[in-house]
Structures are given as structure tokens and as C-alpha cells.
Image: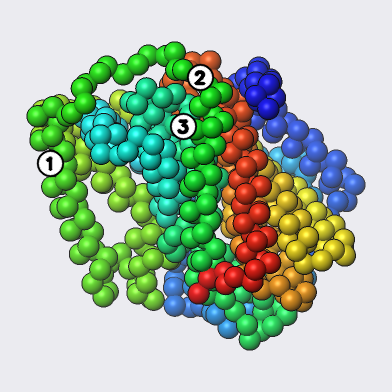
Amino acid sequence: MQKVLDVVERVGNRVPHPAVIFLILIAIVIGLSHVMFVTGTSVSYEAILPKVADVQSDAAKLLDDGGLAVEYRAIDAKGYKIEQREVAARSLLTGDGVRFIYASLIPNFMGFTAVGLMIVAMVGAGVAEESGLVNALIRKLVIVSPRGALTYILAFVGILSSIGADAGYLVLIPLGGAAFLSLGRHPLAGLALGFAAVAGAFTVNMLIKPLDAVLVEFTNDAIAMVNPDDSIGLTSNLWFSIASVVVLTFLIGFVTERVIEPRLGVYQGEKPVEGGASLSADESRGLRYAAVGMVALLGIFALLTLPAGAPLRNPDTGELIGNSPFMNGVIAMIMAAFLVTGTAFGIGARTITSLTGVIKAIEKSISGLGGLIFLLLIISQFVAYFNYTNMGTILALKLSYLLKSSGIGPLPLLIGFISVVAIIDLLITGAIAKWAIFAPIFVPLLVRLGVDPEAVLAAYRIGDSPMNAITPLNAYFALVVGFAQKYDKQAGVGTVVSLMLPYVGWLFIVWTTLFIGWYLLGLPWGL
């Protein structure tokens, strides 16, 4: 296995710069789209079209896990219609295609929300790092955590970070690398641990998150195709999700310690300067200042969220968790938390003495993003062109119909469904976009076979997550490559893929086994 991973790393690192790879992929998509257009490639399907309630004038925006902004409106729970549609391949070499390429350059990039998320998060993270807060917190974490438990603590927090949408990519992954380095362990193992936890288990959590609301709504619309009186709730997968979090925490920690770290060996790069086992007096004072700043910030957000009618609650439903301004803009709170605590720590530790120091820290953090922003410009064009051609939708539907016509039993069909979702996840990373395609096909089919719709949704969560850690179409894959190059200048796409493959393999094996056992035992999927 180690030799295979070494080959993957060598081959992967010999490929051209990621920007060149995506330019080649763009050329392939353009050519293939015209071939499919000329040959009349198309597929018919049933689409669920929920009725939009009039209680909301503007669409609420949530962040899809593929890094794109997706609009949702208030849905009339009892209003929907099923419409037969046909999706055909669209060529980028026709007049309409050429006009799309020419006119959509800026909209494609501006709609790639991962760019804005990254820059906003770095405003706060840069201050926290430059002031010394991050380093002090990591050392404090190392001091108070049992050495053997740190790996599992990071894995657990990484999985739970999905409550903040994509914030885990920006915070937990680099934190894992820095924490491992501070312990004399290989930082790339820490990065891999963070990436596996954040991306590989993205669809499960111990809490209800905005993504759950959308997935459940699509599921209910699909259930209505066969049983209009049946539906599932937001907590329909809660028990399975909680069990998944526990199992995957131990699995990711185990793979990190028993597979990834032995393969990487001893880190030969620059070691951190030893700061002693304890924090200095200035650092301790800085942490106290940071704690005061955090408490003050939480007080402000409590006033903005907890009272009835608070401005960050949904103005129509009053909900806080789910489709609310608070959850839709949670990255702003994360930025503010880093900015306030970083500045407070800097004042207490005397590493920041003026507002100019704060501004320079922000400038320093953002100035290092130039190469990544250029790469995301290229990736945003590829994603937009690929979506325009309908190639991903056609492939997903054809694979779905092939599996549907196989005539196999419910459990094998569910396992096959997990596999199909995983394959498509390499091309369409957004959980919402894929479920919009798959729900109308598989939910009615499996419900007719006596399968609980909660089980279908649980199977989808498994298929959607692990591949996020190895597909370059993940909006944050390039960011992880950049994190890796901080510790290994020779690191590239092959380095990251070879690190993540063991996680992906074991996640599918263990998670699917958990699902099979849960299904056979007839355990409740949620509330």
C-alpha cells in the first residue's frame, strides 16, 4: 500500500501547475460539449418544483459545500409540482456558448463564493496569527490535552466545524498542521487529519445545520411523489449522524496515527523555536485579554440573536438555526472572533501596539493569497463551463437510471446508490446540487421498495462526503495544497491526494459498514 501511495504522489507531483491542469480541462470540456451537442445527447427526468411562498421578497443565500452561493426561498410545505423535463448537452462552441464564455468571466469569478469567504476569514485569521494568539492557543492546547488525545480532539472538532459551513477549511486544517508541528510531529499529517475531518465527513454533525434543512426539504418533495401525506423532519438523521461523528472521529485519528504518520516519517523541515513548556507572562496576559474580548463579542452576538425578533433571526419564521441571517453570515462572526481576540491578545502580550499594527497584519495575510486567487479564477471558469454544458447532470442521471434498472434488492441498491453519488461527487462537489438530481429518482424508487426515506438520505450523506478530500474540483483543494507547501516546498497535488487516499478508502468501508449494520438492525435514523 505504501508503494502505491508513493507512486500516486510521484505521478501527481509531476503533473503541470494546477492552473495549467484546469486550462486543459476547460479545453476538454469545450471540445466534448460540442461532440455531445452534435450527437444530440440528452436525458429525461422528473423535476420537483416547490412553490415559492410570498412571505419573502428576497432569496436567502446559503453557501453550498462546493463553494458556490445558492439561493433558497421560503417554501410552501404543501405546495409542489412534478414536471417532466429533458436536459440536453449544450455546446460551448455555438453562438450562445461563445457569448457565455465571453460575457460570464467576471460573474463566474464573483459567484465563486469561496474567494470571498477566504479573504474575509483571513482578515481576522491574519491578526490572530501575527499577534501570536494562534501559537499561544496551540501551545495551551498541547499543555492541557493528553498527548494521545490531541489527534482525536482535532478530528472531532474538524467534523463538527461543518456547522459553520466552509469555515473549517480555513481554520481547522491549518490549525492541525501547526498543532502537530508544535508537538514535533509531521505537520502534513496534521493537515491531512484536518482535511479528512472537515471534508470527508462534511454532511454529518451532532447539531442541526443549514444544509440539513435544504436536504430534508428536497427529500420531502421527493417523498410526495409517492406518498403526499408522508414527510420527514430536520432531525430525521440525527441518531445516525451522531453515531457517524463518533465512529469517524476514532477512524480518522486511527488512520492518522497508524497509516499517515508512519508513511511520512520524521519531519525534516524547519522546527519551531522552543518556547518552553509553559507560556510567558506576556502570553498569559494576552490570553486573558483575548478571553475578555471573546466574552464581550459573544455578549454582542447574544443581543443580536437570542431575543425574540432579534435582527439576526429569520424575520419571517423567527428561527436562529437553519435559514437565518445568523447562519447565512456565520463567517462574519468567525472573522470578528479572530479579529477581536487577536487584537486583544496583541495588546495584552505587547505584540500589537497600535491600529497600524492590526492593519499591517491583515495586509500581510491577504498579500500571500495572490497565487491562490489566480488559480480560483481559473477554477471558477471551469466549474461554470462544466455546469453550462449539462455534462455532469446527464452523467448523473444516466448512472442513476442504470442502477435503477438493475433489479437488485433494497440494500444492494442503497450500496450502489452510495457508489454512484461518490463517483459523481468527483465532478459535482455541491451536496445540494447533487441531491436535487438524485432525490426525485432514488427516494420514490426506494420508498416503493419499503425503504424508509431517512435511510435514503443517510446513504446520500455517506456517498457525498469522502470524495471531497481528493477531488481537485473542491473549491478548497488548492488551498490545502498551499497549506502543504508551507511545510514542504515540493508538495503538490500528488502529495495531497496520496495523503488523503487512505482516509477516503477507510471512510467508505467503515461508514458503509455502519450504515449496513444500522439498516439490518432496524435502528431509528433520527427523531
Q: Which residue is disc 1 drawn over? A: 288
Please name the residue shown 51% across and 59% down the image: 243
Q: Farthest residue to the right: give it.
A: 39
Residue plotted at (37% across, 14% down) = 270
Secondary structure at numbered mark 2: loop
Choose between 40 and 148: the one closer to the eye.
Answer: 148
Picture coordinates of residue 335 (x, y %)? 30, 44
Given contact means CB atoms under 8 Å apart, are the residues at marks 2 and 3 in contact? no
Q: Which residue is mark 2?
A: 265
- Image marks 2 and 1: residues in contact by CB distance under 8 Å: no
What amino acid type is highlighted by mark number 3?
Leu
Vertical relation: 270 (above or below) 415: above
The residue positioned 52% from the left and 52% from the top of the image is: 247
Q: CA distance from mark 2 to mark 3?
A: 15 Å
* Residue 17, picture quadrant: top right
Q: Nearer the viewer, residue 334 or 390?
A: 334
Label 3, residues with CA under 10 Å away: few <14, some 14-19, many ≥20: many
| Residue 350, horizontal then vertical, whole percent | 10, 28
Q: Compared to 429, does 32 lie above or below?
A: above
Relative horizontal placement of residue 232, taking residue 7 as reference (left or right): left
Element type at marker 1? Answer: helix
